[in-house]
Amino acid sequence: MSFLAPACQLKEHIPLGTHTGIDQITPQRLKAYYSQYYTPANTRLIIAGNFNLDQLRRRIKTQFQTWNTPGKSETYYFPEPNPLKDSVQAAAFIHPNIRSQISLTLVQPFVRHSDTPARRKEQLLLAIANQTLQYRLQTRTETSDDGLRFPEVLTTNQNNCAITHQLSVHTPPGQWTAGLELLEKERRRALQHGFTSQEIQRQYDRLVNDAKRRVTAESQKTNQSYVDEALWVFNEQLTPTSAHDDLVLLESLKPAVTVDHVAAVFQHYWSSPAPKILLSDAIGMKNIQQMLLDTYHVSTLQPLSQLAQAEQQAFYYQDFGPKAIPKQLQPTSYGNIHRYLFDNGVALSVKPTQLEPGMVHLSIRLGHGISGLSPAHAALIEVFNSGFLAGGLEQHSLEQLRHIFYGRTLGANLAFQDDAIQGTYLIANDDLLDQLKILAAYLTAPGYRESGMAFSRAVLENAFRTSQESPESVLAMNLDAVLHHQDPRWSFPDKKQLDAIKLADLKTIITLIRSHGPIEIGVVGDITPQQAIDRVGQTFGALNIDVVPPAISEQQTTLFFGGRQTRLFHQGDQQTALVSTIYPLPKANQQKASMTFPVLREVIQLKLTEIIRENEGLAYSPQAQSTQSRVFQNFNYLGLHSNTQVNKVDAVQTTYRRIIREIQNKGVTQDEFSRAISPIRAALEQRETHNDYWQDLTAIAFSYPEEVVLAGQMDQQLQRIQPGDIQALAQQIKLSDAIEILILPQGTPQ
């Protein structure tokens, strides 16, 4: 932002402040600031919930009527923006770990507009223009061979100082030319030729569908959502409107959504002759600013034609076989999750709720995941996660699928987990059948296009490049590999392995699923069991396959703790390190023991915050985590993590051990126990009001039926836990068996 809007001085006004400002803080200055600005004139009280309004008003008056402290009004320190220049400017930021990205930005002074129907119409037309342009960029990058990915078109209010209109796209390192040409040409094409009626209608329909879903969900809006929305409306000086109001206004503006009106608004906001070119790249070049300017100007000389109306395709995959009727099994004792088994082995679990009207949560679990794949095929895992869906179907490319289903709630995500390939989706009830058709088509007729492999390589190469940019990114890349003794299935493949793979090699995975399974589908939300049966019966239940029904198969493994220390290195700040220590926890043979794990974690989190952050100043955000595997035996552990300074690494490690020993020897106080268990108890009390919770259970109602039973006992078992149970669990931790992971700056002596 120093380049895009220098007069705003935004980097000098980040909420955390600057080093200079922090160094100048004194208790006296803090008190003075508090007394001057924490005053009635600067206070907004927003309350949402079930209350008597008259009683609430009386309570507010009683509580605040004597609070009449005078003070200063809130002040913005941004100066007037510099006059906009009439020539193109360019700047480059080069760093070996940065994600390579090129952007074109137009900067306009901020002007506060009144919230009127006319203003909302203008914002609607601008949103349609922006999304239409982004759709064009996405279409171009999805079919490109030049490594361009993840385009964005954004109009952003920069803290009431400036408005930025920005096009951006990620590029391979040092290969920004194609990205800059793409952004320049597509902006100019839209300015010269506008948008087609088909493009505009597609975006308008998407906005209307989104608005209708918000109306449906209005009755389930949480109190927190009302508070957040009210605060946003107040801060932005908008007129409060309901979801229904927004839909009515949107539909009333349909006559104004024309080719000419959208083009006029786009011209108004995007026609500046002097955009700012900003390059962030991992590879520097001599005279880079001039190269950027020359590339831009050469691109502007190329003639452009108007885009033709694209032909609308229909989805090819409609018939998967005769509609199947499953056998009904016993529902779960907890949650009354309905369970069905089709003759071809496909399992279906259904949990109807009214928590989100009109919406359905879908989960699908395929095969046995990472643990079911041989180490020889380990490199296929990351390629599948990033490239399988991008390879499209035999009859449709990914871009064609996006075009066919654009604006609907359909999704595409499948990724390896320890025990299954899993995908989860939140979709409208009316979209469930098509979502199942898409997934069934990927199982029966995947495209394996090399464009999917190109996309995968771009994603994974970017992961390689950025994997050492911070201690946390190094840990994320390496933790599973460390815990699984460098088993290649839990390790990130190297470039040589990836270069040897073709997307068609993924047939090994798909063939295994189609011949053996299992295939487990879960449906939760505003749907009846019969509706779910009908939709699955037309798709997965109708497939001509014979797979083994899901059944729990717990693997045997041991972490082999025993005082291991692993040193890894990052290329970020040279004064920063990450100290992670993994302590083994015993297998939880009963629900009470299982519930004790998170309570111990919360007790340790309290101590980490109090000792490491507040008392000793060793780290700002120390974190405790606990993991209990349902897939592997002897794979339960407690992890402690602190981002600290290099010269404080030993002190952090010593403090970890001191905290564990203190709990082992002295136990926990009643106050510590209460503070640790309260948020867990509160979360348990609310869990059944969230479809995400039911989706997690419904997804595994066949594979792990005992997990569903135990979930219903959590409240009861939590009540049985006492402070002594926390000490007893801590006493089973062997400090000498810990795995210590130190992530240090590159170049640190061994």
Image (cartoon, grey):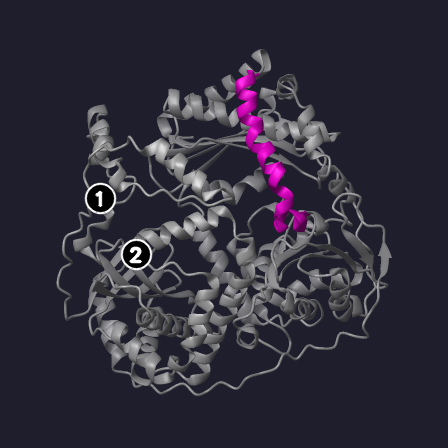
**Residue hosting label 2:** 237
Q: Which mark is residue 74?
A: 1
Q: Is residue 749 above or below residue 208?
A: above
Q: Position of residue 78 (x, y in %)?
A: 18, 51
Q: Nearer the viewer, residue 316 or 303?
A: 316
Q: Is residue 39 left or right of residue 522?
A: left
Q: Position of residue 129 (x, y in %)?
A: 37, 74
Q: Which residues are magenta?
A: 668-696
Residue drawn at point x = 25 percent, y = 82 percent: 301
Category of crowding for the residue at label 2, using alpha-carbon neighbours closer than 10 angstroms: few (below 14), some (14–19), many (at least 20): few
Q: Position of residue 597 (x, y in %)?
A: 63, 29
Q: Earlier in the sequence, mark 1 or mark 2?
A: 1
Residue drawn at point x = 23 percent, y = 27 percent: 31
Direction top: furthest residue: 666
Q: Nearer the viewer, residue 548 or 163?
A: 163
The quadrant of the rendering that contains the N terminus is bottom left
The type of residue carrying mark 1 is Glu
Q: Is residue 488 left or right of residue 114?
A: right
